[in-house]
Image: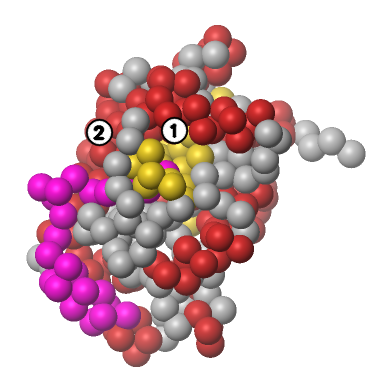
Amino acid sequence: MQPDTGRHLKIDSEVAAAIAAGRPVVALESTIITHGMPAPHNVETALAVESEVRRAGAVPATVAVLDGKLWVGVGADGIERLADAKDPVKVSRRDLGYAVMTHAVGGTTVAATMIAAAMAGIRIFATGGIGGVHRGAASSFDISADLEELARTDVAVVCAGVKSILDIGLTLEYLETRGVPVVGYRTDRMPAFYTTESPFSVDHRIDSPAEIARLLHVRRDLGLVGGVVIANPIPEHAALDPALIGEAIATAVADAEAAHITGKDTTPFLLDRVAALTGLASLEANIALVRSNAALAGAIAAAGTA
């Protein structure tokens, strides 16, 4: 039985027209609005990220759950609604059906945004950082659904690497096992979200958006299933001191353990604590990196209508 996605998928008219005409489109997630940043930075950043995509020559499509539909392209009004929601749901693959059924207001994670993008025919997506294997996963088994989505859904994800609150090395091992290539944009090292690099190598280095677009086309020609991680280091002017951010993360992780924070509440808690411990320097870094990722995703899409 074929899925009937049309009943539950709502594609913005501008986005639909661009897809139909073969013009470049970039998907954008919405947990940055509902769970990732405080007001008013969440709305300002979401609108700025859409502008970065447009400046690069592509059409932005912010994804979210609203009014019993999975929206691909919510527009400025939708972004405001997400920001104003009193109790928005953080929507990953497991939550998607329930959120749509119950008409919840939902911000989509990397995994859910990839699903929506694939449904709509969008091949590239920009976010801040992907989820991964959490520190202490050997006992908690806490591994982000983002990694499984990357293994199964044909959408490339531009990010500043794995969120540095996670275990970067184990995340890369997991991605390798699931056959997900990690491409460094102008870097041989895996970025660490708030800092430009980690001790870990990427699988491949590519130095131009056009070459990345070619890689994505070749993978599709070969019939390879799954996404690609495109690791784009945070701009150097916005990067944080590794010692400062390392200390803040260690404290935040200890605080989460003491408060028995688990599951999907872990990442928002850790990011909030890191922001508080760094005097909001991490928030400014987060804004800079997600804008940079959106610009790169737009350039890749424009180069190859990826």
**Is 278 covered by the magenta stretch?**
no
Direction from residue 70 to residue 31 in the image, left or right: left
Check residue 97 in the rendering and tell me which mark sits there, or answer none. Answer: none
How far apart in space, not on screen, are marks 1 and 2 (Cα)?
A: 24 Å
Q: Which residue is mark 1?
A: 212
Q: How is the image coloured?
A: secondary structure
Report the magenta residues as a range: 230-253
Based on the displayed image, in which of its 4 quarters is residue 88 positioned?
bottom left
Q: Is residue 295 above or below residue 184?
A: above
Q: Can residue 153 be seen at all in this image of the molecule?
A: no
| Residue 118 drawn at (x, y percent) | 61, 35
Direction from residue 39 to residue 213 in the image, left or right: right
Q: Which residue is mark 2?
A: 48
The secondary structure making up most of the magenta span is helix
Residue type marked 1: Ile
Q: Nearer the viewer, mark 1 or mark 2?
A: 1
| Residue 291 drawn at (x, y percent) | 26, 39
Identity of the residue drawn at 38% across and 44% down: 205
